[in-house]
């Protein structure tokens, strides 16, 4: 989290301050990988910035090219310390792939519903 904040700070200072939304608005990280003989389960964490006037959804749905795979549950919402007009929402979820291969975190599409 410190790296993300420091990266956003340095990028923000480079481009003229904090007048715009955070430059790195979203990150998706694979946090663990458990291998099973029949399937693979991955745990994902996802951070997303929201303006204070926006409503923060409690569930985000994710998919890859084969269709819907599950959802990410809202875990926590904290103020964005470098700009008081934004909050950071932390989501967590798991993805089980019966075919034995899971999509990479960067290939997933995250949608609010």
Image: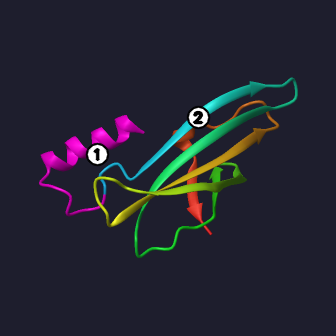
Disc 2 to disc 1, how far (Cα)?
A: 21 Å
Residue 48 at x, y percent in the picture: 47, 55
Locate the C terminus and report the quarter of the image it occupies.
Answer: bottom right
User: What type of secondary structure mainly makes up the magenta span?
Assistant: helix
Question: Residue drawn at (63%, 54%), measured in percent from left and top?
Answer: 62
Please identify, in this view, whether the residue under mark 2 or under mark 1 is nearer the observer.
Answer: 1
Label whose residue precedes the other's in the sequence (2 or 1): 1
User: Which SS class for mark 1?
Assistant: helix
Which stretch is magenta?
1-21
Q: Which residue is mark 2?
A: 30
Q: Which residue is mark 1?
A: 8
User: Which SS class for mark 2?
Assistant: strand
Residue 14 at x, y percent in the picture: 13, 45
The outermost residue toward the right is 38
Q: Nearer the viewer, residue 111 or 20?
A: 20
Is 60 positioned to the left or the right of 88 in the image? Answer: right
Question: Residue drawn at (53%, 68%), measured in percent from left and top?
Answer: 56
Find out whether residue 81 is within the magenta segment.
no
Picture quarter containing residue 32? Answer: top right
Picture quarter containing residue 80? Answer: bottom left
């Amino acid at each position: 989290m410190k790296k993300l904040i420091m990266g956003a700070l340095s990028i923000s200072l480079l481009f003229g301050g904090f007048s715009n939304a955070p430059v790195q608005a979203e990150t998706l990280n694979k946090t663990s990988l458990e291998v099973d003989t029949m399937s693979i389960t991955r745990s994902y964490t996802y951070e997303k910035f929201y303006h204070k006037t926006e409503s923060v959804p409690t569930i985000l749905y994710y998919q890859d090219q084969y269709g819907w795979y599950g959802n990410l549950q809202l875990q926590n919402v904290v103020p964005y310390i470098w700009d008081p007009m934004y909050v950071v929402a932390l989501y967590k979820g798991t993805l089980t792939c019966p075919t034995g291969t899971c999509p990479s975190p960067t290939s997933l599409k995250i949608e609010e519903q």
